[in-house]
Image (tube, rainbow, N blue to C red):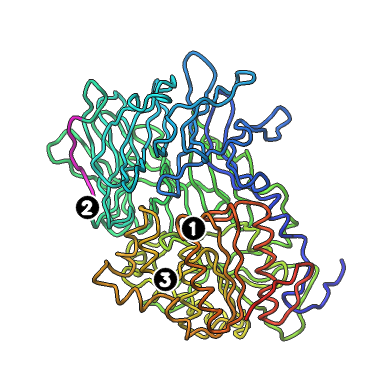
Amino acid sequence: MTEPRIAPYGTWTSPISAESLASSGHPVGGGAYAGDEVWWQELRPTEGGRISIRRAGQAGEPVDVLPQPWNARTRVHEYGGGAWTVAGLADGPPVLVFANFDDQRVYRLDVDTVGAAPTPLTPDGLGMRFAELQYRGAEIIAVRETHSGGDLERDIVAIPLDGSAAADAGRIRSIVAGSRFLASPRLSPDGTMIAWIAWEHPQMPWDGTELRVGSLGDDGRVLDWRTLAGSTTESVLQPEWRDEQSLFVISDRTGWWNLYLLDLGSQSPEARALHTAPRDFGGALWMLGTTWYSVLDSDTLLTVSTFGTDQAAVLDVNTGQLSDIELPVDSVSFGARRGDRILVTGGSAVLASGLRELDLQTGVLTDIRLSVDDLPDDAYLPTAAARTFGTADRPVHTFVYEPANPDFAAPEGELPPFVAFVHGGPTSRTVPAVNPAIAYFTSRGIGVVDINYGGSTGYGREYRDRLRGQWGIVDVDDTVAAVRGLAEAGLADGSRLAIRGGSAGGWTVLASLTQSDVFACGASYFGVAELTLFAQETHDFESRYIDGLVGPLPEAAALYEERAPLNNVDGLSCPVLLLQGLDDEIVPPSQAERFRDALEAKGLKHAYLAYEGESHGFRRASTIISATEAELSFYGQVMGFTPVDVPVLELKG
């Protein structure tokens, strides 16, 4: 065995290139059974970032169900979700129904018809968007978002599968409306009722929602409805019918998202807790169509709960007994089921994320399609160590990835530079994963700490609510506590600490750099730089998010100005890298541009990279390569090492 070369951290060569991140990485999810096949969605960075629907070909290699240039992606809430479904028609083979990104129309593709092209099911040019598509008889049930001039409306609708609504919008039946936001429409088994989730501004779905149930008339529209659970301070999620008279639902009324059963037979249904535990059996509803449990039968649920990492289990509805399913994954979500087989999405720090099939009888997990084509040898992949920093009264949960490369060792006494990864949301979380973006750095001798700062999900409502009114304070303090803890533990060079994050994580990057002197530099991917104009310019779904994170306007106007990193550039003394998609509707380019202008005015070293055709989250291979190599070059220039084989990023100032 060859002795490792001695070389400074950050200068190690690695088989994990930016090109390999872009070419071999293709996030996979949303599996469905289509006849005897499994179909899934797959992001294709080498095809302009489109989302294709794919299946296994005759040789086992994936082939497109949905060919180029079609792109199965919806813009409802801008984050989308549930952009496609399989219609299992009784008189023929499975049919793909999908929302196309470019025009946001819903289409039908008769996959097994030679030469067939997608045909529209919804009209063009009326500002309609559709999400959470679900097949039901001769219709598709969906959440519709309609943009008309300056107005915006949402309702739950039924789209005929025969294409008659493509030229006549009146053929789309509005089942129920009356709320700013709606999600999770579920028709009862006999088709006489519908359950759904609703909420209003300024709540976000993790703050407070309502479970509503309505009776359907002969015309398929809701005659009347009642609220069965939820409030402005109770988040209820994912209703599922047990039978015609009872519903399962998730609620965080105890401070944890746990599972409940509601009996609709009584005048005032009481929610019966099925299993009470200090774990979250739900999560943040960023994308429509997200589910956290599956109904195996009327007495059995397949569940996923989390406290930092996920645990799959079978729940006995009658006894409340929870029986763990041991799977080699730290993150897991369940999809479609057929008999004893269920589709599973997830992975771990040593098992690549992707789509797999679980045999519930044998426990065997079979790969269907992984999110990366080629993984390097395990020796180049870091392990994830769960570490808690901060104090007993104020814990900060993290996953630490130390440098790992079998070909290199650092000079004696040298400590590695570290990059703090700050997730977006901020109501979201990070989990241990085979993350090529992390391995790209760790295999070059740069450590990574992935931080679940206060406000993150997966640790109960109290931990989540730590960020209420404190955005720009708690997230910053927790991130600083984590990296200082690393340095104090002798794991990181305290003089070579960087921070990077996207979206709300980009806000924490900029706020941390302007409020502390801990970091040598930071990289903000489409980050929020100020709040007053952001609240005016961002999209509807998040337009009142800041009410809970900072405070409502106009009462909190002074806080908006005080917290904004843009207004605190005088406290900044280190270089900043800004990366931005020019088509971003969630965090518009103006946010990065204003911060760039402030850096220029102060004469601080910086770089601003703007990408045409990219929106919120980079999807194109060329962008991923450019941004990744620029970030590595940036860290090297600031923290005193020379990376191998990457272009030198030009810094201004």
Give the x, y percent position of residue 46: 68, 47
What is the secondary structure assignment of the residue under circle 3? loop
Highlighted magenta segment, given as a residue range = 223-230
User: Neighbour class for label 1 at 10 Å: few (<14), some, many (≥20)?
Assistant: some
At horizontal 53% and vertical 22% (from top left) the residue drawn is 94
Disc number lying in front (1 or 2): 2
Front-most of residues 116 and 408 = 116
Q: Which residue is mark 1?
A: 309
What is the secondary structure assignment of the residue under circle 1? strand
Q: Which residue is mark 3?
A: 530
Give the x, y percent position of residue 511: 46, 76
- Dividing the picture into quarters, in which one does residue 394 lie? bottom left
The number of numbered badges drawn on the structure is: 3
Upstream in sequence: badge 1 or badge 2 = 2
Give the x, y percent position of residue 418: 62, 75
Q: Which residue is mark 2?
A: 231
Residue 226: within the magenta?
yes
Relative to 555, say whether 272 is above or below: above
